[in-house]
Image: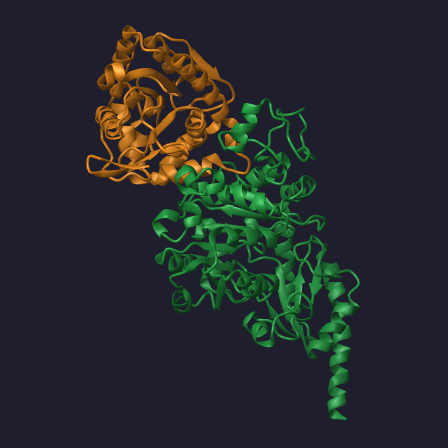
Chain colours: A green, B orange
Amino acid sequence: MSKSSFLGADTIALHSGYQPESDHGSRAVPIYQTTSYVFDSVDEASALFNVEQGGHIYSRITNPTVAVLEQRLAALEGGAGAICTASGMSALFVTFFSLCSAGDHIVSAAQIYGSTVTLLKHTLKRFNIDCTFVDINDQDALADAIQDNTKLVFCESIGNPGLAVSNLPAIADTAHLQGIPLVVDATFATPYLNNPIQHGADVVVHSVTKWIGGHGVAIGGVVIDGGNFDWLKSGRFPTLTQPYEPFHGMNFWEEFGPSALAMRIRCESMRDIGAAMTPHNAFLLLQGLETLNLRMQQHVTNAQAMVSWLQEQDAVAWVNHPDIEPDQHTQTLFPKGAGSMLTFGVKGGRSAGAAFINALQLSSNLANVGDSRTLVLHPGSTTHSRLSETDLVAAGISADLIRVSVGIETLKDIKSDFGLGLRAAAKVAAAQIAQMEA
Amino acid sequence: MYIKVDNNSTFVATGGKPFDASLPTVVLIHGSGLDHRGWALQARWFAFHGYSVFAPDLPGHSLSEGDALTSIEAMGSWLVRALDVAGVGDVHLVGHSQGLLVALEAAEILSDRLQSIVAISTGSAIPVNPSLIETAQNDPNLAAQMMLQWGFGNQHQQGASAVPGMQPIGIGQRIMANNPLAIDLAACDAYTTGSKRAQQLADKGCPSCVILAAQDRMTQRSAGFILAQDLGTQAQVISNMGHMLPMEAPKQSLNIMKTFIQSIEK
């Protein structure tokens, strides 16, 4: 399926969704820092509330600055529409909330972000929505896990932090064969490296906090409606194909077709849950998006160089990156490289890993990824600390795993910093050996 | 709502309200490869302001079953049969692009039941480049891309949307690539009696309205002005917009449509 714009990705990232002749000729997208919008008349207000015309009512629902980011991201991913939210997690929540009701079921990849595991395994369970976790690239296991009440298959295009690449075309085929849509969190890939809709995904979610923003100053999320899934033919989605009473019995599928899910999220979730992105955050995220393509090239170049360098270091026990001996689907899905996340373990296990992180001077030990700066973290102690030992193994997280989000600094400086860490780790490992020998 | 026309399940959008044949009825007819969703916002306005809306998917398009009809004449007579099934009496016909050609043929059959006709981004003839028809036969996705590239104006090529957050080109692509575009285009190309039908309507004194787009690259504006002349009216041109006016400029096109239709209902 083609993109929803005929401009190149670099141009879309800079121009899509905004033209300066509107407003006052401002070349940059203005920040519409307002809660609400004056109606021309009572009739116009009525038309806006009843979806008889497009426009803005209240910034919890829509905002002009946020709309530019939405339209730009929808164009970059080749979608029919997009809804920005306060965070990546709220983007996931409104997606699940819009497709599932009590008694429904989700099938998810096991190797995903820890907070998403918590949402799927614990939070949604309180609303009687169950989840089965599977090895997402085992198509037999996936097919077996789909039940009569399954509403979606979920995966991350590159899993966090295991970095397994989901075989999107195969997963989509398995899901579609049973009338189920595929929802993909593509945060680690960004629209620069991979467009999941082109590979069979029906809904794409990003935490735009990460590489899309890149600066690490604003939290945000987005849901992109691919527009390809036939919600009626599936027969599983009354939220989209049956009348919705709060809007005079609106039938989202009949009235809006390819943008039915986006319109449902807009009309229901943004109104009732209100996890809206602020206009200022949208502005900041737009600044990042403008240079996404350039930054991602540098991220990937640095990451691949760091993988090679780490593999040569005596203190390193193992290194993981999807581009190390990539399988066929990784090469097909990620011809420009499979992202800038890597994981590795140092000899000496968890304590040596802690020494590595504590010795770093340039890289930051924090709970984020996708910043332009190099970031490191020990997931077992932080982002995935709430998972059981069994869940940690299922998520591909060993006790010694160090997660690295490789930044765009000068490569020699990252190596130099990691050299400090590895020397510290080596001392711990040597002390361990000496202790054992004693 | 779904109705049976020629034994085929036919979807007719009613603008979000139950269809009531006793109300003045506005019939919205989509263009080549499209469906009722192009009228989503206009349909809701008419439905919630004292009109009944009848916006069908032509046979074989989106939610309607059946084989696609291969001539504009067949589409026109089919439309009248669909209106009869729904018990509709008098109508205002609104046609976008190919939809106007269908309206002209339906008008011939409807005779005095026709209250007015509105033409949007169209002419009385729509010749189609044979290579486009061939592309639509062989590669519907590519043909849809080409149509949308020419169909949307400059702002929408750069991601503009009348509905915040949406991508009209992406929406159009999904609809058009899955509908019988090649058959529609061939039907448009073969249709040659539009000018005569328009002049007949003018002779009968049928009220008419022609809305054109300044950046229309699908049907030449000169063809639209000739149509207006045939219908005995003046064309109104919406600036900065392309051929896909119902999706590109729903508010502006609605304002002209409703002002015109309301003036007749008074």
Q: Is residue A346 left or right of residue B60?
A: right
Q: Is residue A335 visible?
A: no
Q: Position of residue B113 (x, y in %)?
A: 27, 17
Residue depicted at x 57% and y 47% = A222
Residue extending farthest left:
B6
> Quadrant of the rendered structure where residue A409 is?
bottom right
> Quadrant of the rendered structure where residue B220 is?
top left
Q: Looking at the image, is B134 positioned above or below residue A319?
A: above
Q: Could you tell me which quadrant the C terminus of chain B lies in?
A: top left
Of A438 and A42, the residue lying toward us: A42
Q: Position of residue B79 (x, y in %)?
A: 26, 27
Q: Is residue A401 visible?
A: yes
Of A401 and B66, the residue lying toward us: B66
Q: Position of residue B131 (x, y in %)?
A: 31, 31
Q: Looking at the image, is A388 positioned above or below residue A369?
A: below
Q: Looking at the image, is B256 positioned above or below residue A340?
A: above
Q: Position of residue A254 (x, y in %)?
A: 39, 39
Residue depicted at x 65% and y 55% = A370
Residue depicted at x 43% and y 22% = B216
Q: Could you tell me which quadrant the N terminus of chain B lies in?
A: top left
Residue extending farthest bottom:
A438
Residue extending farthest front:
B22
Of B1 and B121, the residue lying toward us: B1
Q: Looking at the image, is A182 positioned above or below residue A433?
A: above
Q: Is residue A78 left or right of residue A42?
A: left
